[in-house]
Amino acid sequence: MLRVGVCVSGGGTNLQAIIDRVQDGTLANVSLEVVVSNNRKAYALERARQNGIPAVALPPKDFESREEFHQAFLELLDSYKLDLIVLAGFLVILPPQMFPKYKNRVINIHPSLIPSFCGTGYYGLKVHEAALARGVKVTGATVHFVDEGTDSGPILLQKAVEVRPDDTPESLQRRVMEEAEWILLPRAIELIAAGRVQVKDGKAYIREEDK
Ligand code: GRF
């Protein structure tokens, strides 16, 4: 069993996609141990509770300093003995001391084809606004391993999505989720659970399925 923790800040549709794949047996070797949010009001926490997954709110402002928040965040994750941490719309920079301990054990979903429209300041609708402003004809989503930088770790999976002439940031965001994010993130977890992913020299490689 791959013990997975999911960190969220918002609605949790990506979390839902993972829960659905656990429930339909696609992620048969995965156990969702905990969902953590910096935002007490995140609907993602409700989704976790409805599915019997421990849901923990850990707002940074409840702590005297960033260091104390980092300490509590790390202790919480450590206590669940996780094999993999999935950032599914998590808007908090991870504590630097998570690395190298969790090196190649944290993945993130980003709503563009990295290295386009990524890095500091590119989150949520801003990513899609920037893609439309640049006039790209395809965008998409990326699942990557998380390192000390922002959106800079080894790329695991990418999927392209067509941009339409009449797209708004909202319509594009929705289509990138439906056509790419909700497929890629569970798939990434499935590949990792099957032991098919290897990271070497800053790149992720996917081994062919055993015949
Ligand atoms: C997604 O667009 C994801 O790519 C980004 O944040 C959004 C989270 O949406 N990192 P949800 O909370 O999973 O619905």
Image: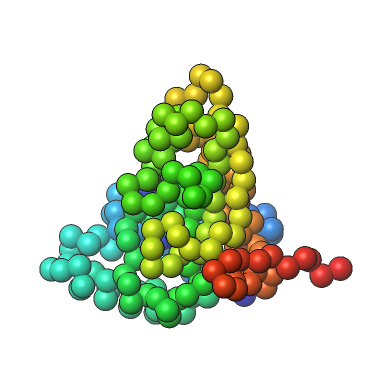
* Residue 55 in sight: no
Q: Residue at x 40, y 32 (%)?
A: 129
Give the x, y percent position of residue 208. 77, 65
Coloration of the structure image: rainbow
Q: Residue furthest left?
A: 64
* Residue 10 in sight: yes
Q: Is residue 47 left or right of residue 176?
A: left
Q: Residue at x 40, y 35 (%)?
A: 130
Q: Is residue 192 left or right of residue 112?
A: right
Q: Is residue 165 left or right of residue 77?
A: right
Q: Residue at x 44, y 43 (%)?
A: 117
- How many callouts does the rendering have? 0
Which quadrant of the view contains residue 186?
bottom right
Give the x, y percent position of residue 111. 48, 45
Q: Residue at x 37, y 38 (%)?
A: 126
> Observer-nearest residue: 154 or 184?
154
Give the x, y percent position of residue 57. 31, 61
**Quarter of the picture holding the N terminus:** bottom right
**Quarter of the picture holding the C terminus:** bottom right
Q: Residue furthest top?
A: 166
Give the x, y percent position of residue 18. 56, 55
Which quadrant of the view contains residue 64?
bottom left
Vertical placement of residue 39 versus 99, above or below: above
Q: Residue furthest right?
A: 211
> Observer-nearest residue: 142 or 18?
142
Q: Is residue 6 left or right of residue 58?
A: right
